Amino acid sequence: MVEWEGAPGLSDEEITARKEHFRILVCIDGSDECYQSLRYAARMGGGVDADIVLLYVRPVDQGLRSGGLQVRVARENMLKWGIELPGIQYLKKGRDMLKELGHMAGEEWREEVMHTDVDGDPLGDNKINYINEQGKMVVLKLKVASDIATGILEQWELGPYDLIILGASGRWKGMARSFWDPAVAEKVAVHAPCSVLVARDLDIGHGHLLCTDGSEKSMEMMRRDAELASRCDCAVSLMSVALDVEGEDEAKENVAKAKEMLEAMGIEVKETLVKVGNPIDEIIEAGPDYSLIVVSESGKTGLQRFFMGSVAFKVMENAHNSVMIVR
């Protein structure tokens, strides 16, 4: 079941229209990285066919059993009362940022508050839907889960989503498993059925670097990312890496084929790069000149990806800038 199907006040026509929306899940933890990611999401979600969901995941209970009055009030409306419950202030800041960016400007946005009971937790899941006259939606979601990665993946099942964005925060270093422990990003990237963007100092003005090995899988990635890049008017560059000089001609053919396909779609290619060496090292070295490195995963199951690894996941783990794995 997609979460908005149970929202009060949605007509059958609105539900049908929303099924066609481009849906972005932005994971919020209060770090600079998550709000940089939100700026990118706002740019990608600027059209009337896009919904943005801000998600904060917290562990079950988290010391709330004694706060009966606060919990009851938070259930009624978790934002209007300004209560310092976990995650609420982070979500409010995200909503206010979307307003400042003009994402929630213009039409009236009606507000719908929803609560779902969760066993063992007095607060449960809470969310507010903001919906404008055109059916565009912004959602603030305070979700309970056994751990952060599980909560994000469970939220995908309620969506589903076209893109999950999470910040690769450095705040975990030296701390006891802060929000974006690298293992969280890895688990979400391995198991999520949709595209995943792991953001590091995400600056949206430098375009996408699309990496291709000439396979049909990577060509499909090119087509999908072309759609994403067009949403934010992001420039597109292409890169292929040959393992040795004997494979250089093939790498050149890879980028030429990809460029021809994208230009046939009306997508301008800013530049093409052909490198020789270890693909992981070469991609990571080139990456900082772009907003995003874009790679395709192997197509294996989540378990196989976890044990076997791939260029995509090694790039995601070790890159200095943002990486998007496209599915």
Image: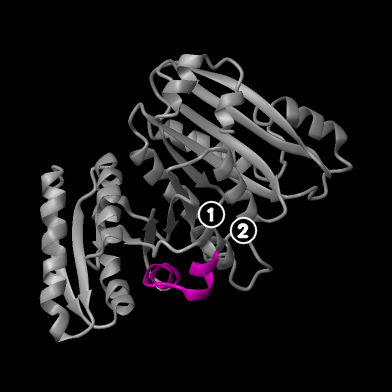
Label annotation for residue 31: 1
Q: What is the magenta segment's predominant secondary structure?
A: helix
Question: In the rendered structure, which disc, 2 or 1, sits on the residue that comes first in sequence?
Answer: 1
- Residue name at image x 28 percent, y 42 percent: 232
Q: In the rendered view, does 72 fall on the left or right side of 15?
A: right
- Looking at the image, can residue 290 be seen? no
**Of 67 and 324, the residue lying toward us:** 324
Residue shown at 66%/42% (left/top)?
A: 143
Q: Is residue 157 visible?
A: yes
- 167 to 101, vertically: above or below: below
186 relative to 318 in the view: left or right: right
Asked if residue 280 lies left or right of residue 15, the reply is left
Q: Label 2, label 1: how many angstroms apart (C-alpha)? A: 9 Å
Q: Circles 2 and 1: CB distance less than 8 Å?
A: yes
Q: In what element is the residue under mark 2? A: loop
Amino acid under disc 2: Phe
Crowdedness near tag 2: few (<14), some (14–19) or many (≥20) residues, C-alpha within 10 Å = many
Rendered location of residue 214, percent (x, y): 22, 65
Count of numbered marks: 2
